[in-house]
Structures are given as structure tokens and as C-alpha cells.
Image: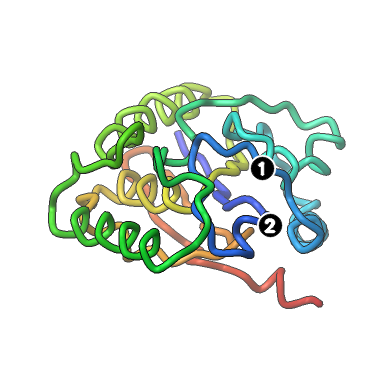
Amino acid sequence: MTKTLYIVRHGQTDLNKQGIVQGRGMDTDLNAEGRLQANLFYDSYKDVSFDKIYISELKRTQQSIQQFIDKGIPYEKLAGLDELAWGIYEGKESTPETKAAFLKAVRNWTAGELDFKFENGESPNEVQARQKEAMATIMSHSEEHTVLICMHGRAMRLLLCLLNDLPLTRMEDFPHQNLVLYKVIHDGSKFEIVDFNNSIHLKNH
């Protein structure tokens, strides 16, 4: 069974613009730039015959691909696609202290401390466990050949490690920005990235 996955990060929110960590607990809306990014992505990919759309349970993902839903393409929310929970640091003002805490977490993770998490937050290992469930759901539908997945930055890094059979310590190998695209093909046995960090559609303005 072959399947093509178009995996995108949601469009910009005000917290993105301000450099504030959102995480799973912040259900924010797209800002004007994010809505423009959504329009540009739709204009570039509206002719792709998506069989299904999968989004997280956070509204910024649905807002990013709403125009595809409006065309009548069926969609499903999967909690496994939610962003990593940053716990006590979610929504906190961007300060030298919060930036240092964020960098410390990333350093811990890339050094192999994949159970590290902030208070009330999630570790990469915990996120990957729910991502495996989400991917089992997505891959179980053999009738869906081309799917659109809209999710979140840190979670997308972890998912791409999972799909490429890479350790989560390699998460920083996958750069991204708001509404950037990774296109991944499953040939029946393995996944392969065929479009890496594609932002060409955002260059149209």
C-alpha cells in the first residue's frame, strides 16, 4: 500500500510572532500573517486530490487548512498530533530565563535525555507514544492514498524522526517555519521524504 503524506505546520499565531512557547495547552488562533500563509498554501495545493485531512485537537491547525475542509474533504482530529506540552512554560513571556529553559530542554533531548520534561509537561518519548497511535490510525485506511496532516513544530520534528526511523535525538535535523511542507511517501514498507522543508508557496507575497 502506497500513501503520500503532506505534513505541514500550522500558520503563524501572535505567540509565534512574539517568540512565546505555545505547546499543547495553548489553544491560540492564527493571526493575520497566519491567515495569509493559509491562503498561500491553499492556492498552491488546492488541486491536490486529498482523500482525507488529519489535524490536531488545537484550532490553529484547523484554521490553517479550513479552505480544504470547505471543499468537502473529510477530516479527523487526532490528539496524537497535538503539540508537545511545555507545562509551566506555556504562554510565558519570552525572557532570558524562559529562553534558557527552552534551550536547556532541547540540549537535554538531543543529548539523549528523552524522558526530560518540564513540570506539567511532556517528554519527547511521551509525545512519540501518542504519535505512534495517530500514525496507526492514519495508515490503517488503505483507501486513503493522499492525506494532508496539519500539526505543530516540535511535534512535527518528532514525527519526522519516527517516520524516518531515526532516534529522537535527531529532532533538530528537521527545520521548519509556519506552514512549511514536508512531503513523505510510504512505498508499502518504508517512508521517504521527497519534499524537505518546502516553503516555496510562501514566497508568493
Amino acid tagged 2: Asp
In this figure, which residue is indicated by the disc labeled 1? Answer: 28
Q: Nearer the viewer, residue 49 or 163?
A: 163
* First along the sequence among labels 2 and 1: 2
Name the residue rendered at 62%, 55% in the picture: 15
Residue 73 left/right relative to 5: right
| Residue 3 percent across, percent down from the top left | 51, 40
In this figure, which residue is indicated by the disc labeled 2? Answer: 14
**Label 2: how many Cα within 10 Å (few below 14, some 14–19, many 20+):** some
Name the residue rendered at 57%, 39% in the picture: 26
Name the residue rendered at 68%, 57% in the picture: 14
Q: Nearer the viewer, residue 95 or 31?
A: 95
**Label 1: how many Cα within 10 Å (few below 14, some 14–19, many 20+):** some
Instruction: Give the quarter of the image for residue 135.
Output: top left
| Residue 73 percent across, percent down from the top left | 77, 32
Circles 2, 1 touching at the beta carbon (< 8 Å): yes
Alpha carbons under labels 2 and 1: distance apart:
8 Å
